[in-house]
Amino acid sequence: MSSKSVEFFDQQFRRQLQQGGAELNPFELAALPYLQGRVLDFGCGLGNLAVAAARRGCQVVALDASPAAIGHLRAVAGAGQLPIEAIEADLRSYALAEDFDTVVSIGLLMFFDCPTALRQLASLQAHVRPGGIAVVNVLVEGTTYMDMFDAGGHCLFERDALQRRFEGWDLLLCEQQDFPAPDDRIKSFVTLVARRPAA
């Protein structure tokens, strides 16, 4: 994520914290029933999904580039003695060192340039254990609200890109949703949940 995008979301997260926003968004709610075992939340934001997963018995590694988000999540995890490891990291270049039962990346990959986004998506897929679950949510072509993007570093996925990238996996959910944005613009998302074939 470019420094511009990190600053955008760091400010947004600070505003959300002032307003007490800890509710799961629609994509996190869709992901929650599929979370199991050791979970990677790649681009965790304020960590609402990581906290919900930990409270359901999962062990969570939560990564984000926002200092405000990670500081908040560490405080929440510590106060609740939750099994969450919260790490501040540049996710454009972050190299995963272990495999997970569930890998989640909601609302992140489109903030990378396309080669970086596809490279990190492939890395996430490679670190799902056999029989494990991947949950990926991205903005796709058709999105007209672009205010949060750095003009030189983002990637609107083709609408069927995730399905093609997960060919051979068991697709549990794949849906496209449009949401209204300021000035009669649209945010168009695809959310995919897939199970990696067992070894």
Image (spheres, grey):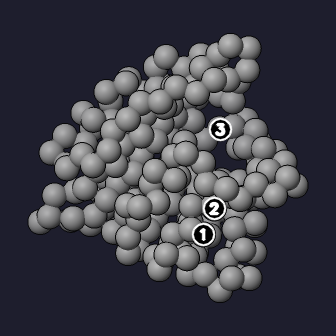
Residue 74 seen in the figure: yes
Q: Position of residue 198 (x, y in %)?
A: 14, 64
Q: CA distance from mark 1 to mark 2?
A: 6 Å
Q: Position of residue 50 (x, y in %)?
A: 56, 66
Horizontally, is 143 left or right of 18 in the view?
left
Horizontally, is 171 left or right of 158 in the view?
left
Front disc: 2 or 3: 2
Q: How would you rate the neighbour count of disc 3 (Cα within 10 Å): few for under 14, some for 14-19, many for 20 or more?
A: some
Residue 131 sits in which quadrant?
bottom left
Residue annotated with mark 3:
2
* Amino acid carrying mark 1 in the image: Val
Residue annotated with mark 2:
47
Q: How would you rate the neighbour count of disc 1 (Cα within 10 Å): few for under 14, some for 14-19, many for 20 or more?
A: many
Quarter of the figure that contains the C terminus? bottom left
First along the sequence among labels 3 and 1: 3
Q: Which residue is farthest bottom?
A: 81
Label pair 2/3, CB-CB below 8 angstroms = no
Q: Which residue is farthest top?
A: 184
Tell me which residue sits at (48%, 36%) in the image: 138
